[in-house]
Image (cartoon, coloured by chain):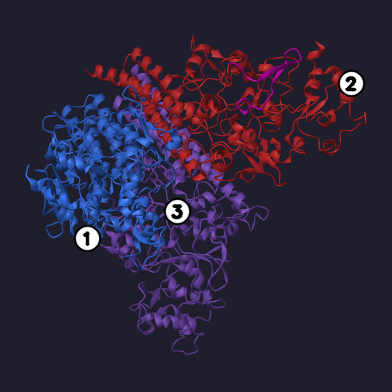
Chain colours: A purple, B blue, C red
Amino acid sequence: MKKKNRTLDVAVVCVISLLLIPVLIFAAKAKPPGNAAYDIRAKCYGCHDEIKALKEGSKHAKLACTTCHAKFDAHMDDPEKHKPVTIIDQQLCGKCHKNQVASFFNVNRDGGARKEKGVPAGRSPMQDKLLAPYGFTFEHNEPRGHAFMVIDQFVVDRFQGGRFQFKEGWKGIDKTGKTWDVLIDKGAAFKLKETGMAGNPTCIQCKSSDHILKWKFMGDTDPRAKWNRTSSVVDVARDTHNPVGCIHCHDPHGTQPRVVRDAMIQAIERDARNNIFAKEGKTDLKVIAFRDDFRKIGVMGKTDSRMMCAQCHVEYNCGGGAQWSDGKPVTFTDRRTNHFPLKNALQLLKHYRELDFFDFRHAVTGARLIKLQHPEAETYAGSVHDKAGVQCHQCHMPRTRGKDGKMFSTHGMVKPKLTVKASCLGCHKDSTVEKKLYEIESVINYTKGKMRKAEYWLGQLIDAYAAAERMGVSPTALDQAREKHEEAHVLWEYWTAENSDGFHNPDLARESLTESIAASKAGVKMLSDAMAALRK
Amino acid sequence: MKKKNRTLDVAVVCVISLLLIPVLIFAAKAKPPGNAAYDIRAKCYGCHDEIKALKEGSKHAKLACTTCHAKFDAHMDDPEKHKPVTIIDQQLCGKCHKNQVASFFNVNRDGGARKEKGVPAGRSPMQDKLLAPYGFTFEHNEPRGHAFMVIDQFVVDRFQGGRFQFKEGWKGIDKTGKTWDVLIDKGAAFKLKETGMAGNPTCIQCKSSDHILKWKFMGDTDPRAKWNRTSSVVDVARDTHNPVGCIHCHDPHGTQPRVVRDAMIQAIERDARNNIFAKEGKTDLKVIAFRDDFRKIGVMGKTDSRMMCAQCHVEYNCGGGAQWSDGKPVTFTDRRTNHFPLKNALQLLKHYRELDFFDFRHAVTGARLIKLQHPEAETYAGSVHDKAGVQCHQCHMPRTRGKDGKMFSTHGMVKPKLTVKASCLGCHKDSTVEKKLYEIESVINYTKGKMRKAEYWLGQLIDAYAAAERMGVSPTALDQAREKHEEAHVLWEYWTAENSDGFHNPDLARESLTESIAASKAGVKMLSDAMAALRK
Amino acid sequence: MKKKNRTLDVAVVCVISLLLIPVLIFAAKAKPPGNAAYDIRAKCYGCHDEIKALKEGSKHAKLACTTCHAKFDAHMDDPEKHKPVTIIDQQLCGKCHKNQVASFFNVNRDGGARKEKGVPAGRSPMQDKLLAPYGFTFEHNEPRGHAFMVIDQFVVDRFQGGRFQFKEGWKGIDKTGKTWDVLIDKGAAFKLKETGMAGNPTCIQCKSSDHILKWKFMGDTDPRAKWNRTSSVVDVARDTHNPVGCIHCHDPHGTQPRVVRDAMIQAIERDARNNIFAKEGKTDLKVIAFRDDFRKIGVMGKTDSRMMCAQCHVEYNCGGGAQWSDGKPVTFTDRRTNHFPLKNALQLLKHYRELDFFDFRHAVTGARLIKLQHPEAETYAGSVHDKAGVQCHQCHMPRTRGKDGKMFSTHGMVKPKLTVKASCLGCHKDSTVEKKLYEIESVINYTKGKMRKAEYWLGQLIDAYAAAERMGVSPTALDQAREKHEEAHVLWEYWTAENSDGFHNPDLARESLTESIAASKAGVKMLSDAMAALRK
């Protein structure tokens, strides 16, 4: 192992020992101690020169290593055998960054939790038909804030048979904090009716930063990695204590803006000049590898929240599936189960065909379908606001005044509709809250209209397929119609998964959704013609 | 006729003579008159010793019998020929219990009346398909308050061809009071398009207390009873002047908490140890029979609003139907047309199979279906709140301050969402209105999601049945699928009929609705397999 | 050309020259100038005696002709060759009638624009199925105010392939004013996906007053008319600069209440004694023809807003279609493409059968369908309010106080639900805002319930037709079912097109919608029976 690649990678203790907290508070509040017993930076830097490079000269330069790490003595005795303890916990950062952390955990109680999308006035009224038999048909809710991202992922009916439940029942539904203070594991034998067995170790990498030191780049198997793509999702879940941490976007040693999600870094490096973040053929991202490429991070010179948010707010694949070419399964041993396309709605099907991967087959037509995640980054790329240089945080993390009277960027990731003045009027100085809301609502109204039409026509295609199959229409006609379903589906589902109802890129939404409608109509026509021909 | 069973059962004059009102006011306000002309209690007690037992020592002990009864002289002359007049009217009680009666008649004007449930964003968006051809498909509205329970029952399009209409048209839609001040009877020849001919004398026994002395136990035929199960519903309707009265739950002679609904008393006696209200093998209910079992009431030592409300807020059968065993009709001569199962969603189908009764056949599949009423009591039984000893009135009749400054239990039967502070925070002292509302909304969101899924799959089953029948699938396969429809239907419809959207018992709601989904899916699979087999 | 029929009909300059405005302001503000150079009334009257008749003695009598007209000298030199310029622009009237014009252009920003009706909780949730393949399935939005009537007509996806777009994109969506300040024409080559090519010169006559002098009565071809029914709709659109003008309802010369829409005048004259506005066999409308019947207007002695509003708020036909008798196309050369039936929901199908015209064939059943416009006037006719003598403006244009403190009739055409006090309580003096709102909501709830049922059954009929056709049911049975579809459709669609959700005439709504349901059910039964017979 080359020294220059060795870092402070350590065993992570994700549950902060309560005993440690007074020490941490002290460490955070105290001036950087000159006492060598506390400040062992020099010793650490002796091996971890990358850390020195990040830390020295930064705002965090004077923080003792003990602020975030413990158990040094054992580590110094035998660096390979004994790893130091690293605190992965927003509350530690919150000792100084109070407003940011408080806003992250602030709960918006409007409208309640577990709001199913698949209901008539919901975001995806026809999903039970269009996504059958995929796990999302068991329960698929409107998202809550980041503070709930791990909890809601584990408790949802499609995840592991419902074995993870709120400890306090419905009274615990608005509780935030450590996962296992909020949830209990009812055990492997517990199984609720009509639940799925979804979830995998990779998807948790977007929900939590807890495994950052236990997960090799891309989740490959490695003796140094506690978890990998093939690990038991339940074991990984039980080891997940925090929602996404400050360190996902902020380098803790040096405060640099950064990204840590492996498949995101891979996708940017795969297409360095033309990826969705590149301006004039490049991005301001410097990739740093640790421990012989065991782990990589990407550090930016300047904050680019488009990349920081895109660590999760993209379409990515994290599950098993099958190949277009031969229908063979793609399992978790395959790197395609940790993959960011970074392509938009119009490009995705082609991308996945070339990757030779699809997620599932539709229950009625057998169409090979992609299950979309929340492709906000790809949608935003190339939009009017993106071209104008606006980044995610300007709208979703507007500056506001904390309880202490200081201005700060809210880390609650708000819906800009609730903060129009702060989110919009900084740039749109001649406009008004009322006017901007009207514009936003209009885009949403229009896009929702197109989504509903795309769903109607997908439904027509599925029904026509079933009728044609019953009638004995030729396999060739069915195959052709099925391909139309494959086209139409991605072009639609993208928009129910994307969280802006079209606002991030109205033109792209329109183009994609109307192409979906056209493909569905073409499929319906093929089948109607084939059925009419049979009647003659 | 044994004397000890003789009571003050009398002909009821439901329309209070306006001439009587001054007397009544005087009677109520005045001190109990010593004047024998007014106070004939001693004479009454001579025959009616049960009344004496109820009345003496109670808060109503000093009220003269003339407070609620008139025409004694004739009665004394010939007790069998001339019955005294009894006033069944909330306004009489309201002379003293002003706040209670005022709150009963208070109108919540939010959102308007006649809000059809069978619309996309309504409580039962697919009912026209799932309940076809049942009468509820003609009009089925969100319920209004108790003050409208008779009016809304008579005016709804499924009731008697629309012959009962608002006297003042839409301007009369928020009018409360005597039925025939609000409605008119357009006559037997009047028939609106797309209306039903539903309704029967028994169902009116849950809507009004007017017939309490004219109706034999269980509605059996008897010369002493003006009305019975086989009476003309129109005649009974025209004789119904008041919504459910104070006397349904409060004994007028002695103010004891009580129940009067016959099928409810029957159901409790049928299963004295294990009925849904029993704690440790018994209920605090003493059944008193009058006039050789002509009539029964159940008196409680302590208020148990679970039983008082359960007189109506249950699944009950009051209509004709047919037998599972042989398909033969069950008509109003049969006591099964006045029946309370007191069973919950998971138990009901078995119960009705054993009772050998179903309501109607589905228009498409021919499945033998149960039409559910509002099974709040059975749902609540065994819930977290029930186990904790909470009763209906604690949430739905919270104490509030009247215009006179006195605290009283509201008799407007509110939605607790509108009164969280009074309804919830008395017990949940550490919580907040905001937090409780969030929890309530979350339960509702989740349950609604499951309801919509259950409906989707019932719809799929019906469509698959029709397709399979057209294709010529074997009767055996159709029979099996039809049985799945029978299972799935009850497990679903229960929850659209129940008024809490799952909050009364979230676990039961989940279990029932997911079992419904599973049964529907099983039926769809049977039919799909049978159709696929035919194609080969 | 007879002198008495010659008028000031002139070439209209719809874009007001900015250079003219100071003159106009001066003209409007100044006292009627005695200066002959300005006041050429005497000269004008020399030829235009109808104008004199209208103008003299009226409130506008003293206004110089130059207030609204220019380029007289050239006109006097050669009256046939040089037409004077006429200003068709609300802003000109607004110089004096400030409040009225300001209220017309006031924007209600609640809820955003482009709110598609064809979504689950929208006004017409099943339209994509029920109206297929008609152009309204591309985009059909909740209407905005009158200020947007031209803009929204041109920008909607069903109009001319989407070539007309907001100049400023979504930021321009709440902009009012001159059409081509708000929109741009992307050109004939521009075509968005999933758009229609709807629109025709006649429909624009209800959206704008700009063509009043360029359009012959009924839109017939004439060398004196710049536009006629067969003109290019794009050319007419590009020449349309203003939404409906003051002059549609107010005679500019004499301030008389008037109507100008040709097909409306024709329909009233066609049935002078029994048209929907007639009281005791007549209407207070005097039709004046100009220039040898080139143009007609109808002038009233007293305001009758039922007729003024009915110029647009009716079912009218303005598009091509086909004949019931022989299926042959009806093109724009045919006067039936500019036709007002003035018949209500129950009468319309018969009317259109007699007219031998239908709009389109349904995509699945081939039923010959009428596409309804907004038949408010026909709906209102004969309603309780109509019989009581209430006119449209009393509810929709309530009197309010302007910024200048003066009371005036709002010209924003409000929803009375937003102005109950001013709209309702003037007549209903004993009622309250809360009570009236409750009544209105109740009517709407009830009618919406019936609309949703009518849609459900139309959907069932369409599905049954498709299944029957696939099964090989006889053409006779299909024909009979198709006729039921034709009946049921008009009786339903009328109510989604009509904008009051039944309030204008609840009884008519009920009768029509339940007849629709009955017709659909009859069709479904025919098809089910025919399919059952085939299975035997």
What stretch of residues is rendered in magenta? C281-307
Circle 2: residue type: Met
**In the image, what residue occupies the spot 56% across and 44% down?**
C112
Say left or right for A128 vs B508.
right
For the point 57% across and 41% down, the residue is C113
Left or right of C65 on screen, residue C377: left
Q: Which residue is mark 3?
A: A340
Instruction: Measure the alpha-carbon separation of dots 3 and 1.
Output: 50 Å
At 57% across and 72% down in the image, what residue appears? A405
Report if the CB atoms under discs 2 and 3 are less than 8 Å apart: no
Instruction: Give whichever of B346, A265 is nearer the camera.
Output: B346
Q: Amino acid at mark 3?
A: Phe
Vertical arrangement, residue A116 with respect to residue A2, above or below: above
The residue under label 1 is: B387
Mark 1 residue element: helix
Which chain does the numbered disc 3 sit on? A
Is residue B353 depicted above or below C509 in this figure? below
Q: Out of B191 and C469, give the one closest to the viewer.
A: B191
Are there few (<14), some (14-19), or many (20+) residues within 10 Å of tag 2? some
Please tell me whether mark 2 sits on a helix, a strand or a loop.
Answer: helix
Question: Disc 1 residue type?
Answer: Lys
Q: Are marks 1 and 2 on the same chain?
A: no
* Side (left or right) of C308 relative to A498: right
